[in-house]
């Protein structure tokens, strides 16, 4: 059997603002020696944690092992902007067929929102969840049409929303930067690291977690009864394997020609002082998404911090050094200054990076790859809700349990075939360049 070597491994920076707000925790030991399990889950982000939890609920006697390259729940699951969304703006919907396609994707994302809300309630997780909608904004007149088209789409789908302009928008955000906004009721803001930590802490005791245990190679066992995975100090064989590594999927040999990764960076400020808050009019907390792909995602949090995410890059080794982050921090600061010229320049407290996984047609990965090996991921930057939904449902699928959610997920198309490397990298780079140009006033 051929062994799949995993050459690019996660290597997180330690500067994520969300994680820094958490109390320290003692890491679980790394895998050592030889072990056997009924189930192995590879990756301990939202997808892997949700999968492990569901497996434990379905198979209380089984041995379930989770392998995590770094610290559990501290990869992209803790590093994102914290928008738990049902509707997204940049999707094609200009025909009846397009509308139906959008509706199906919407329904899956909506199921993801409900899955998170259910989990948060069931496990009593405090993750600063605020269910008061999101706002799609533009600062450019020519992009107003996108907002208006989106409003038409939401009306057709009977989804509650409202156009915001002029003084109303200015007061809502505490900024006169944007020309037009569209508030949608379905959008939840949360603190992602608290959510990931909450799920981790409430994992059923039966789940064994090994951290700092990167899987460096795997292969199918020759008698076709399961898989063997190796870490630097250990080896594990299992009957069934669930791969939940999202941005690292292609590196692990999963759908390498149907998905690609981007590295995103974000910065978070310290809490504003009372004077600074007053200078922007003390608006209620909010979350803004750009009408233009590659435009900035911005949040004003309950504790009066500003989060700015306005970069996305092809970055093959996925790791940004502190010098790399320093360069991106300047872009984040620029984005903050454009929106809040009344604030000073000493605001940013932390800058970090994370990896996302995309497909060419906005589709997700959710399937049995080969006998006993399953994968879920490729969430196109909407992986909070989808990660928890797909993680739970891939465990159901792998256990032979059919659910309405699985049927719903499977009505959507699979990721399309992409050009081989290096053409894919060049193509994506070019597309990002164009999008960045179009979004130059939205960053
Ligand atoms: C800056 C940023 C902003 C974002 N904003 C949003 C947002 O607002 N809303 C939203 O819904 N989504 C957002 N996303 C995307 C979201 O974070 C992801 O879709 C989500 O984290 C996917 O969860 P996951 O568990 O599938 O993957 P991850 O959270 O990436 O977890 C995968 C885990 O697998 C581990 N792993 C990888 N390779 C190996 C290996 N070889 N061996 C062992 N372990 C391995 C990793 O260390 C990691 O912990 C954003 C992402 C970033 C980076």
Image: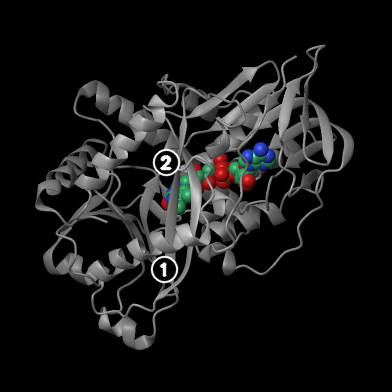
Asked which colour scheme the image uses, the reply is one colour
User: Residue 415 appears in which quarter of the rendering?
Assistant: top left
Q: Position of residue 29 (x, y in %)?
A: 82, 52
Which secondary structure lies at badge 2?
loop
**Is 268 on the left or on the right of 317, as rendered?**
left
x, y percent for residue 15: 55, 64
Displayed quadrant of residue 285: bottom left
C-alpha gap between disc 1 and disc 2: 29 Å
Please name whichever residue, 226 or 349, is drawn nearer the observer in this view of the structure: 349
Q: Is residue 83 visible?
A: no
Query: Mark 1 Cα within 10 Å, few/some/many (few <14, many 20+)?
Result: many
Q: Position of residue 153 (x, y in %)?
A: 22, 37
Mark 1 CB in 8 Å range of ligand 1? no
Ligand 1 location (quadrant): top right
Residue visible at 71% across and 42% down in the picture: 214
Tell me the residue at 43%/77% (across/down): 271
Q: Which residue is mark 1?
A: 301
**Going by the image, does 267 lie left or right of 95?**
right
- Secondary element under disc 1, as helix, strand or loop, is loop
Q: Which residue is mark 2?
A: 314
Task: Please state if 438 lies on the left or on the right of 4 as rendered.
Answer: left
- Neighbor class of circle 2 (other Cα within 10 Å; few <14, some 14-19, many 20+) is some
Q: Residue at the location (33% across, 71% down)?
A: 284
Residue 46, above or below 102? below
Kindly tell me whether residue 338 is visible in this rendering.
yes
Q: Quadrant of the N terminus?
A: top right
Q: In the figure, is residue 225 to the left or right of 9?
A: right
In this view of the protein, which residue sits in the foreground, 71 or 334? Answer: 334
Q: Quadrant of the C terminus?
A: bottom left
Task: Judge by depth and name the residue closer to the eye, 387 or 330.
Answer: 330
């Amino acid at each position: 059997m051929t062994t799949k070597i995993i050459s690019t491994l996660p290597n997180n920076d330690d500067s994520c603002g969300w994680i820094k707000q958490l109390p320290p925790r003692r890491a679980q030991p790394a895998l050592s020696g030889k072990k056997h399990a009924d189930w192995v889950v590879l990756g301990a982000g939202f997808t892997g944690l949700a999968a492990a939890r569901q497996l434990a609920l379905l198979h209380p006697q089984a041995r379930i092992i989770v392998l995590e390259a770094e610290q559990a729940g501290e990869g992209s699951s803790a590093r994102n902007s914290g928008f738990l969304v049902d509707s997204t703006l940049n999707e094609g919907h200009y025909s009846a067929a397009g509308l139906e396609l959008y509706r199906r994707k919407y329904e899956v994302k909506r199921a993801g929102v409900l899955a998170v809300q259910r989990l948060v309630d069931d496990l009593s997780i405090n993750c600063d969840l605020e269910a008061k909608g999101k706002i799609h904004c533009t600062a450019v007149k020519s992009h107003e049409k996108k907002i208006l088209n989106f409003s038409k789409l939401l009306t057709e789908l009977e989804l509650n929303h409202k156009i915001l302009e002029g003084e109303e928008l200015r007061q809502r955000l505490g900024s006169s930067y944007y020309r037009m906004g569209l508030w949608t009721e379905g959008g939840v803001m949360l603190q992602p690291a608290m959510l990931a930590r909450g799920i981790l802490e409430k994992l059923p005791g039966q789940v064994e977690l090994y951290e700092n245990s990167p899987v460096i190679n795997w292969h199918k066992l020759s008698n076709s009864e399961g898989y063997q995975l190796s870490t630097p100090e250990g080896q594990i064989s299992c009957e069934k394997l669930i791969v939940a590594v999202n941005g690292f999927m292609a590196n692990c040999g999963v759908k390498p020609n149907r998905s690609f990764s981007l590295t995103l960076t974000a910065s978070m400020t310290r809490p504003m002082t009372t004077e600074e808050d007053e200078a922007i009019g003390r608006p209620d907390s909010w979350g803004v998404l750009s009408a233009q792909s590659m435009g900035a995602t911005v949040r004003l949090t309950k504790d009066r911090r500003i989060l700015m995410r306005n970069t996305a890059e092809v970055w093959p080794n996925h790791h940004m050094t502190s010098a790399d982050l320093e360069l991106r921090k300047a872009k984040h600061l620029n984005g903050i200054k454009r929106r809040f010229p009344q604030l000073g320049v000493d605001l940013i407290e932390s800058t970090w990076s994370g990896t996302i996984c995309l497909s060419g047609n906005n589709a997700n990965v959710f399937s049995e790859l080969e006998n006993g090996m399953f994968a879920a991921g490729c969430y196109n930057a909407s992986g909070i809700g989808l990660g928890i939904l797909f993680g739970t449902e891939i465990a159901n699928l792998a256990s032979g349990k059919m659910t309405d959610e699985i049927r719903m997920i499977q009505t959507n198309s699979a990721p399309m075939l992409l050009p081989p490397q290096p053409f894919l990298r060049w193509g994506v780079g070019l597309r990002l360049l164009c999008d960045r140009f179009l979004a130059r006033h939205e960053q």
